């Protein structure tokens, strides 16, 4: 009888907790740039696989966990806008574990083929004289909070600023 009572009580608690939608208690991670680490766009010369050339973009991000429990940043996905051009899709599967109230520095790397984003080639070449291009990363950030669920936050602007253009 005692086991039956404990079993019923545990079932009621589990049902009650599930109805509370505990995923809403997870606060979104805070993403910011990293002081002293400039985002950069490095031009890539034409090659057989990239006939008109391309670029490599590195964005430095600091991701902070404002929660009082550990979680894992599972992915960042959205659109990267460079210069005045249209955005292009990016998806960063991360798997970055963050302890409660902890943070991590995460480089976000993107390889761009100018065949896919022709307007970016012109903007990057024009920016060689000024040495920089504006950028903005609009994305969702997905987390794995264990028993509290796997919420996604956004889309919102996570990073923005100037990309240093390197030959």
Image (tube, rainbow, N blue to C red):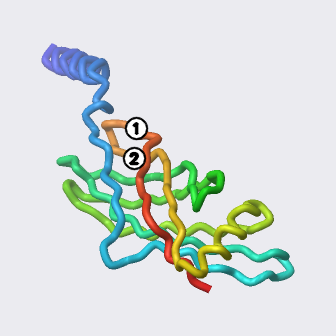
Quarter assignment of residue 33? bottom left
Instruction: Look at the numbered discs 2 and 1 and tell me whether their residues touch, using CB distance below 8 Å.
Output: yes
| Percent x, y of residue 101 | 19, 55
Q: Secondary structure at mark 1?
A: loop
According to the picture, the residue beneath numbered tag 1 turns out to be 151
**Residue at image coords 49%, 55%:** 137
How many callouts does the rendering have?
2
Q: Position of residue 15 (x, y in %)?
A: 29, 18
Would residue 158 appear left or right of 121 to someone viewing this image?
left
The image quadrant that residue 24 belongs to is top left
**Disc 1: CA contacts within 10 A as few (<14), some (14-19) or many (>=20):** some
Q: Position of residue 112 (x, y in %)?
A: 68, 67
Q: Of callouts 2 and 1, which one flags the residue occurring earlier in the amino acid sequence? A: 2
The disc at residue 143 is 2
Task: Please state if 125 lies on the left or on the right of 24 as rendered.
Answer: right
112 or 118, nearer to the observer: 118
Residue drawn at (58%, 61%) of the image: 83
């Amino acid at each position: 009888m005692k086991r039956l009572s404990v079993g019923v009580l545990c079932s009621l608690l589990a049902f009650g907790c599930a109805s509370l939608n505990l995923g809403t208690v997870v606060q979104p991670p805070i993403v910011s740039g990293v002081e002293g680490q400039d985002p950069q766009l490095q031009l890539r010369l034409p090659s057989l696989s990239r006939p008109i050339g391309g670029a490599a973009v590195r964005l430095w991000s600091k991701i902070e966990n404002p929660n009082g429990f550990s979680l894992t940043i599972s992915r960042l996905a959205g659109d990267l806008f460079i210069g005045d051009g249209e955005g292009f899709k990016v998806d960063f599967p991360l798997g970055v574990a963050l302890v409660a109230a902890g943070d991590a520095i995460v480089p976000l790397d993107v390889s761009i083929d100018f065949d896919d984003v022709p307007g970016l080639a012109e903007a990057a070449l024009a920016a060689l004289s000024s040495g920089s291009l504006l950028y903005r990363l609009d994305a969702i950030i997905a987390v794995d909070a264990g028993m509290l669920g796997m919420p996604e936050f956004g889309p919102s602007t996570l990073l923005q600023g100037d990309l240093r253009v390197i030959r």
